[in-house]
Image (tube, coloured by chain):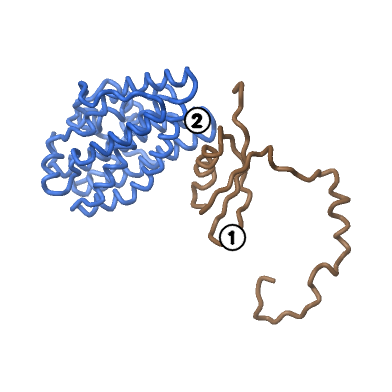
């Protein structure tokens, strides 16, 4: 920890978007079919675009010579404030769309609230992003339903994906210290206020997909928001940051 | 690559309100809903559209290129079918 709550919060939101955007971009050129390759790449670009606005904002708050690039490429795993869900590996297509669905359904309600933040910069970013996320949610819901309620094989894979990812969803609603502090000031979203909306949406889609959600009161893995990550983030950063680490400030 | 390829769809995009849908291209999708979503992702990334139509390619019936001579050439010398004999005022554009 090092930055004041407001900066930590902007970094947390930016890191969420960048890490999931990067994960999705790993599919570019490898999608199951050209049309879906483009669809997921579009979502990756939306998320990286959101991350840029948030990093630029954080960089302005930090000052000195910090930029969006030094924040994205110059911090180590323990500096990242993203939730654990977004850093999990892609697995198969089913796991990727399940991860997207669990996150997009959260981000949809989250940005819906952040729109009313007393921080006008965050509110403006939320307003732009919520349209993109509405589509991400629609796209990922369609896929979860299609595969969950599909063949025996696709159903089994979706059950497995849900099983692997469910323990990271609790963190979406467990506020870090900086979130609690800013929620009181009306800057951060009170995560408690969107929990039942998320649960309802997830239950609706999983129900239609013939999948069973895990219990909400089961044990959940947390720590990402404070910089305690799963092993996967380090590998992701090693690849994502390689060029800037090896050739600092490199441009092309 | 796939044992069962998804069917092919033709995509028509309306670029602005008031204009016609124009053929944009084709894509693969499992059903109509997915075809519209795919069309959104493949053909409207640069703000090209406000409305999308999709139709499965197998439902498009096309004229035979081999018959082009008999179908279209006879219109060549029928100038009286074109309203070219009117004097148009200068104010009229795009005629």
Residue where numbered disc 1 is placed = B19
Task: Please report the residue visible at 23 percent of the width from the left and 26 percent of the height from the top.
Answer: A216
Question: Is A241 situated left or right of A179 in this image?
Answer: right
- Circle 1 packing at 10 Å, graded few (<14), some (14-19), many (20+), is few
Task: Estimate the spatial distance between the alpha carbons at disc 1 and disc 2, rounded to whole Å.
Answer: 35 Å
Could you confirm whether marks 1 and 2 are on the same chain? no
- SS label for mark 2: loop
Q: Which mark is residue A29?
A: 2
Task: Please report the residue visible at 45 percent of the width from the left and 36 percent of the height from the top.
Answer: A41
Query: Mark 1 or mark 2, which is nearer to you?
Result: 1
Q: Position of residue B58 (x, y in %)?
A: 68, 37
Q: Please name the color used to draw chain B.
A: brown
Q: Position of residue B66 (x, y in %)?
A: 85, 43
Q: Quadrant of residue A228?
A: top left
Q: Is residue A64 above or below residue A22?
A: below
- How many numbered marks, from 0 up? 2
- Circle 2 packing at 10 Å, graded few (<14), some (14-19), many (20+), is few
> Mark 1 belongs to which subunit?
B
- SS label for mark 1: loop
Question: Is A224 situated left or right of B63 in this image?
Answer: left
Task: Please report the residue visible at 47 percent of the width from the left and 18 percent of the height from the top.
Answer: A152
């Amino acid at each position: 920890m090092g930055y004041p709550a407001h900066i930590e919060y902007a970094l947390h939101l930016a890191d969420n978007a960048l890490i999931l955007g990067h994960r999705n971009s790993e599919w570019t050129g490898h999608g199951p079919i050209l049309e879906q390759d483009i669809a997921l790449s579009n979502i990756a670009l939306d998320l990286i675009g959101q991350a840029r606005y948030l990093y630029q904002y954080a960089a302005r708050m930090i000052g000195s010579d910090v930029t969006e690039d030094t924040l994205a490429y110059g911090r180590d795993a323990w500096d990242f404030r993203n939730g654990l869900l977004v850093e999990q590996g892609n697995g198969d297509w089913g796991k990727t769309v399940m991860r997207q669905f669990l996150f997009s359904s959260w981000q949809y309600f989250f940005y819906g609230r952040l729109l009313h933040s007393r921080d006008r910069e965050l509110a403006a970013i939320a307003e732009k992003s919520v349209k993109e996320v509405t589509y991400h949610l629609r796209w990922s819901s369609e896929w979860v339903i299609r595969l969950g309620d599909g063949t025996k094989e696709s159903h089994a894979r979706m059950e497995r994906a849900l099983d692997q990812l469910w323990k990271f969803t609790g963190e979406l609603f467990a506020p870090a210290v900086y979130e609690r502090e800013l929620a009181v000031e009306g800057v951060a979203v009170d995560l408690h206020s969107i929990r039942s909306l998320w649960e309802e949406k997830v239950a609706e889609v999983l129900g239609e997909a013939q999948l069973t959600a895990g219990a909400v009161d089961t044990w959940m893995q947390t720590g990402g928001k404070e910089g305690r990550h799963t092993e996967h983030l380090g590998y992701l950063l090693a690849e994502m940051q390689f060029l800037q680490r090896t050739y600092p400030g490199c441009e092309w | 690559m796939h044992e069962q390829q998804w069917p092919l769809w033709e995509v028509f995009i309306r670029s602005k309100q008031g204009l016609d849908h124009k053929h944009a291209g084709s894509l693969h999708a499992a059903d109509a809903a997915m075809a519209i979503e795919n069309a959104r992702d493949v053909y409207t990334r640069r703000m090209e559209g406000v409305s999308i139509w999709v139709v499965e390619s197998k439902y498009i019936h096309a004229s035979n290129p081999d018959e082009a001579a008999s179908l279209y050439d006879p219109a060549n010398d029928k100038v009286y079918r074109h309203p070219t004999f009117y004097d148009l005022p200068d104010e009229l554009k795009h005629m």
